[in-house]
Image: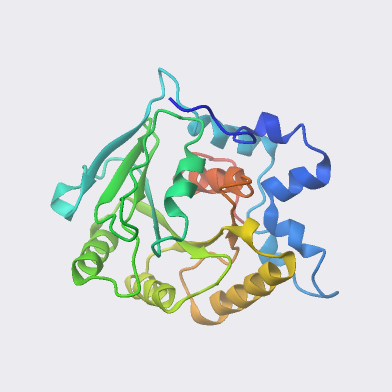
Amino acid sequence: GRASPPLAALSQVLRLERSRRTAIVFPLQKLERYLAPGTDTARFRLFQPGLTALQRAEALFRSDRGHPIDYVSSAVRMDHAPPPALPEVCFIGRSNVGKSSLIRALFSLAPEVEIRVSKTPGHTKKMNFFKVGKYFTLVDMPGYGYRAPQDFVEMVEAYLQERHNLKRTFLLVDGVVGLQKTDHIAVEMLEEFGIPYVMVLTKIDRTSRGLLLKKVLEIQEFVKENTQGCFPQLFLVSSVEFSGVHLLRCFVAHVTGNLPNVEAR
């Protein structure tokens, strides 16, 4: 198995000085200080778990003999999908949005897990299912391109409509370029089916703080004005620096019912 990268574990993050620690665990809060005075920051802090909850979530993502984390299977059609026995979350996003890197970061404490990446970008045409012990399943959906093929649309629509154990969909958006036309199509699909979802801004290490804040405020406004099913707080992540990964693990644990004492206010 691979070695875990630095900052993959909370114990490593807790050794950092406070400002850096906040930037890694709560990257959205780190942006608050750059807001104009009087800006409503409620949407920056809806999900703000304490250390105990973060540690509990980390334990779920850390494999050991009694708690295996495994790639289970791939499916092209719903009748090939594993039985819907556990609470499930799925990750969708444009090709090259950094989805494989993020899933690899989430599972970095289970280095034996192999995240399959298609050789050709945008050609991961299967749904990949990962089982986290007896607690939940994470589904990596194919990346969609500028012209999402019809078979992809049909696969994803069938999954979203039929998968009754789906607890939350994570829509990945490139933090450098923001919402694109194809992302709007994905939002429309999720809204049409009444699927609860959350937006995750990826690659936040590749943009300046000012531009990132501008994107965050634009997308927050879009969510407020145009969506019903989207969680009002955005999640910011960098798979390179590990920013936001611990918080995202915690949110996954929360929405799958594995953090009974945490409130998403």
The residue drawn where x is 37% and y is 70% is 190
Q: How many marks?
A: 0
Extreme residue in the right direction:
37
Is residue 67 rendered to the left or right of residue 225? left
Whole-percent x, y for residue 125 in the image: 24, 56
The residue drawn where x is 47% and y is 76% is 180
Q: Quadrant of the C terminus?
A: bottom right
The residue drawn where x is 69% and y is 51% is 26
Which colouring convention does the figure follow? rainbow
Extreme residue in the bottom direction:
225
As displayed, is residue 237 above or below residue 106? below
Whole-percent x, y for residue 128 in the image: 29, 46
Whole-percent x, y for residue 44 in the image: 69, 62
As displayed, is residue 64 above or below residue 190? above
As displayed, is residue 230 above or below residue 114? below
Whole-percent x, y for residue 43 in the image: 66, 66
Q: Quadrant of the N terminus?
A: top left
Extreme residue in the left direction:
79
Name which quarter of the figure residue 8 lies in.
top right
Extreme residue in the front direction:
119
Is residue 249 rendered to the left or right of residue 50? left
The residue drawn where x is 49% and y is 68% is 230
Camera-side residue: 242 or 64?
A: 242
